[in-house]
């Protein structure tokens, strides 16, 4: 190859490189996204589970929402108050006093307590089992179906099946709400971690029907309501409910409950 050819090739490559470089610079300027420094700092503090328990698509979305002021600094249920306080320092606000919560399964209908009306041979998924005629193989249509859908969706391995019903391990639960959303019987709810006495039943049937279906159900007798001196226990729609804000943990309700469905959870 002649010297002229080499020079020509070098010039072509140089010009092409210059053009490409100019195009890249222009594209970078056109599509440049201003990075919110506080958003990056907040994202660095979030645990990265992307569980969705905060109500956002993931940790990136939550970080953006917090940085823009759309979400509270204590919105992450997994990080809890520790992460909330750290984020509050970045945002220059008060973290407040967030109450730690835990998922709770409102059913005591274990295999030895509840009675069956049929056999289910379908897909081992509560959301599938609940749509068959009769809703469930158990006589109680309000209780735990026992097919473990909540177990499968929990990203923290905090819930397991024990003797036919789901059971939450409070220490492992991060209150992300995945199990609450997955349960077709709306059987799981988030309650204050510090609450001592809880009603382990979800049935709205009358006493006779409850006894026919399960030995561990609330019969709506109001003995617990009468025993509570603090107005913390109320029976509504045949089911006892405890107001954790009013409950002092005296145990009078549990002592008077004839079916022992009000239990100590700590």
Image (spheres, grey):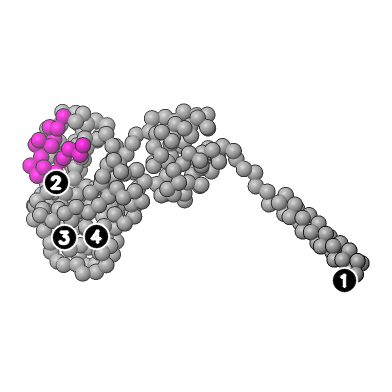
Q: Residue at 87% of width from left, 71% of height from top? A: 1
The residue wearing badge 4 is: 147
User: In screen coordinates, is 249 left or right of 58?
Assistant: left
Label 1 vs 4, first from the N-terminus: 1
Label 2 vs label 4: CA separation?
Answer: 23 Å
Please state if 136 lies on the left or on the right of 259 as rendered: right
Helix, strand or loop at label 1? It is loop
Spatial separation of the CA atoms under disc 1 and disc 2: 96 Å
Which of marks 2 and 1 precedes in the sequence? 1
What x and y, as percent, mark residue 8?
A: 88, 65
Q: CA–CA distance between discs 3 and 4?
A: 12 Å
Q: In the image, which is nearer the foreground, mark 3 or mark 4? A: 4
> Mark 1 against mark 3, which lies toward the viewer?
1
Estimate how packed mark 1 is, as few (under 14), some (14 to 19) or many (20 or more) residues with alpha carbons within 10 Å: few
186 vs 255, left or right, is right
Residue at the image position 27 percent from the left and 42 percent from the top: 170
Q: Does the rendering let one see residue 80?
A: yes
> Vertical placement of 69 versus 126: above or below?
above
| Residue 218 disc label | 2
The front one of 1 and 187 is 1
Q: CA distance from mark 2 to mark 3?
A: 16 Å
> Height in image: 261 above or below 229?
below
Tag 1 residue = 1
Nearer to us: label 1 or label 4: 1
Look at the image and say whether residue 216 sits in the magenta stretch: no
In this figure, which residue is indicated by the disc labeled 3?
A: 138
Instruction: State the SS at label 2.
Output: loop
Q: Are marks 2 and 4 in contact (CB under 8 Å)?
A: no
Q: Earlier in the sequence, mark 2 or mark 4?
A: 4
């Amino acid at each position: 190859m002649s010297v002229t050819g080499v020079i020509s090739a070098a010039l072509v490559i140089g010009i092409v490189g210059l053009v490409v470089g100019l195009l890249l610079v222009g594209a970078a300027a056109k599509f440049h996204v201003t990075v919110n420094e506080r958003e990056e700092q907040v994202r660095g503090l979030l645990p990265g589970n992307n569980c969705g328990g905060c109500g956002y698509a993931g940790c990136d979305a939550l970080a953006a929402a917090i940085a823009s002021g759309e979400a509270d600094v204590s919105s992450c249920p997994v990080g809890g108050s520790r992460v909330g306080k750290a984020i509050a320092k970045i945002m220059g606000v008060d973290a407040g006093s967030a109450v730690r919560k835990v998922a709770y399964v409102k059913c005591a209908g274990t295999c030895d307590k509840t009675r069956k009306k049929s056999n289910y041979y379908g897909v081992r998924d509560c959301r599938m089992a609940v749509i068959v005629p009769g809703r469930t193989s158990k006589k109680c249509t309000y209780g735990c179906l026992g097919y473990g859908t909540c177990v499968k969706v929990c990203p923290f391995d905090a819930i397991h099946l024990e003797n036919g019903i789901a059971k939450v391990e409070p220490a492992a639960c991060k209150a992300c709400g995945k199990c609450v959303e997955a349960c077709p019987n709306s059987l799981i709810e988030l309650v204050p971690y510090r609450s001592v006495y809880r009603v382990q039943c979800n049935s709205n049937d009358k006493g006779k029907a409850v006894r026919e279906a399960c030995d561990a159900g609330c019969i709506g007798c109001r003995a617990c309501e009468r025993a509570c001196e603090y107005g913390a226990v109320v029976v509504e729609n045949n089911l006892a409910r405890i107001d954790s804000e009013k409950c002092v943990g005296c145990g009078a309700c549990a002592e008077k409950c004839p079916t022992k469905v009000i239990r100590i959870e700590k």
